Amino acid sequence: MSRAGAGRPSAMDSAVLEFVRRRTETTRVEVARELGVTAATVTNSVKRLLSAGLLRESGYARSTGGKRATLLRVDDSARRALGCTLDEDRLSLVAVDTTGALRSRAVLPLADPADPSEVAEVLREGLAIIAPGDELGAVTGIGFAVPSDLPAEVADALQQLTLALDVRAVRGTEAACAALGSFWSGEQAGSGLSGTLHLGSSIALALLLDGAPFRPDSGRPLNHMTLDPRGPECSCGRRGCLHLAVAPTGIADLTRTALTATQGDEAAAEAVMVAALPLVRVAAHLSSAVGLDTLVLAGSPVQAAPAIYLDAARQCFGDDPGAHVVVSQVQPHPCAVGAAVLALQTFLEAGQA
């Protein structure tokens, strides 16, 4: 879905822009020191970013005896990017600014996410809400958090619609987008290795290193990881697959049960805990093996009953001082926010903004 353009700027510009974004406000001297490059290199990069409208000078740093250094910050009004994700019963659409901050949102009902015509029409309605009139032509691009079971016909319909509207588009996995949405929303530290275990159309783990996807295809499904070789038989022919323990009747049913649990239903709460424990045990093993600094649990069941999943994490991780577990609460949807961030990164870095 991505349409790459020419004129790709140096990686230095992207590195400078990202460092300034993380610091909120900083100076050229601090950028050079952090990135380990010369002052002249930073000066030239900043000139390009100022000219492109991506950075702005916001004042002066405190005097240290000489000439006061000029402060830099990302111009959050410079660009907008859109993000979209599909669930079983809804389409979520967001717009973020250059800093990744949420600017507008729309959540629309979806009767059949496998119907290309309906999905395209609902997306068109959502775009009219968050980018009305001429605003759509000014967006940097749109990112799609793609479900693992998205029919090819729906993917084609989305591509045809974005081409017809002349909006650049890029795709990412649900888990990778959920990870980016969590990171850019401030749920994770600015550096280190983090893993986001996402419950969506599949159960998947995405890794970020210093806020960037560890691999371009990060977030492959773990549904058929064998949890118990003597467990129930799966349609894949094996036994004890992970998804049979975590969401035996599907993520949508688990989400409904989680919502019921938050209303005081003890049986529902117990059912969610039974589903959460094997998930978090797998997460604990993966976290220990990979050496994660942060583990993020994400997905609609987790958002519906965060306290239950945190309790499961405490039971599995115990008092491990190295374990930092976060339950993602990015609204309206971490995948949609992350997909917008993916579009922002892709097209700013490709010089297409």
Image (cartoon, grey):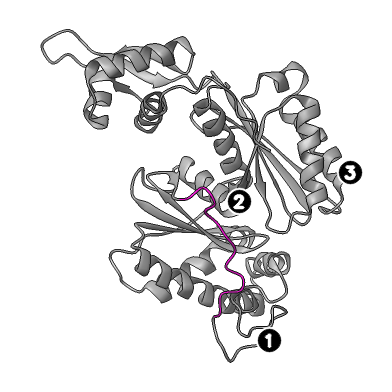
Q: Residue at x 63, y 66 (%)?
A: 262
Quarter occupied by residue 45: top left
Question: How far apart are the alpha carbons under marks 1 and 3?
Answer: 36 Å
Work out whether mark 2 precedes mark 3 in sequence or the reverse, and give the earlier one: 3
| Local SS, label 2 | strand
Q: Residue at x 52, y 19 (%)?
A: 7
Quarter occupied by residue 223: bottom right
**Foreground pick, 306 / 26:** 26
Instruction: Name which residue type carries label 3.
Output: Ser
Instruction: Find residue 117 and name its label.
Output: 3
- Most extreme residue toward the top is 67
- Most extreme residue toward the front is 6
In the image, residue 335 lies at what x, y percent?
61, 48
Instruction: Name which residue type carries label 1.
Output: Glu
Quarter occupied by residue 162: top right
Q: Which residues are magenta?
A: 215-226
Residue where numbered disc 2 is placed = 173
